[in-house]
């Protein structure tokens, strides 16, 4: 019985420490402006930039011929960047300093699936924040 209580107490302590270390855990996701860079080299250094004025850009990769420029909205923890030239919408779920590409929430011609896999994580680069 002592062993069960010790393990349970240890789990509770780890949970409390983990929650206190992540300041975003108790807050609803909100947009942080700046440059988000894909955490993996594939897809070819993809990036997302969100500016304070509500404009943004999305580069699916250095070798891609696409560069998306447009305006974004934020609703329910999701950023939706609308391409001014095509009307396509690219969705990213917000996390604690991250934006995760959501292919199912995006409205595109399917081209992006070849470049940026669903679930690709983009991390805010604080050094280049607006």
Image (cartoon, grey):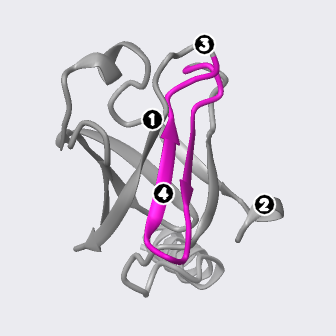
User: Residue at the spot x=53%, y=57% of the render?
Assistant: 98
Magenta segment range?
A: 43-62
Distance from label 2 to label 3 (Cα)?
22 Å
Q: Which residue is mark 1?
A: 120
Assign a secondary structure to mark 2. Answer: helix
Can you tell which mark lies on residue 128?
2
Graded by Cα atoms within 10 Å as few (under 14), some (14 to 19) or many (20 or more), the crowding at tag 2 reads: few
Q: Is residue 16 above or below residue 96?
A: below
Q: Is residue 31 above or below residue 66?
A: below
Camera-nearest label, 1 or 4: 4
Residue 50 part of the magenta segment? yes
Q: Does any portion of residue 77 appear in the rendered image?
A: no
Camera-nearest label, 2 or 1: 2
Image position, residue 39 (x, y; %):
63, 37
Q: Which residue is mark 3?
A: 63
User: Residue at the spot x=43%, y=87% of the render?
Assistant: 26
Camera-nearest label, 4 or 2: 4
Distance from label 1 to label 4 (Cα)?
18 Å
Distance from label 3 to label 1 (Cα)?
17 Å
Can you tell which mark lies on residue 43?
none
Image position, residue 87 (x, y; %):
21, 43
Can you tell which mark lies on residue 56?
4
Residue 61 part of the magenta segment? yes
Instruction: State which quadrant residue 78 falls in.
Output: bottom left
Q: Quadrant of the C terminus?
A: bottom right
């Amino acid at each position: 019985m002592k062993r069960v209580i010790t393990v349970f107490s240890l789990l509770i302590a780890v949970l409390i420490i983990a929650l206190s270390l992540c300041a975003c855990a108790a807050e609803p996701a909100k947009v942080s402006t700046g440059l988000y860079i894909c955490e993996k080299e594939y897809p070819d250094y993809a990036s997302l930039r969100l500016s304070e004025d509500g404009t943004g850009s999305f580069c699916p990769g250095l070798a891609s011929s696409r560069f998306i420029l447009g305006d974004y909205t934020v609703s329910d923890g999701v950023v939706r960047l609308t391409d001014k030239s095509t009307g396509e919408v690219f969705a990213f779920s917000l996390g604690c300093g991250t934006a995760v590409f959501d292919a199912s929430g995006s409205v595109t011609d399917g081209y992006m699936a070849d470049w940026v896999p669903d679930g690709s994580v983009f991390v805010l680069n604080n050094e280049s924040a607006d």
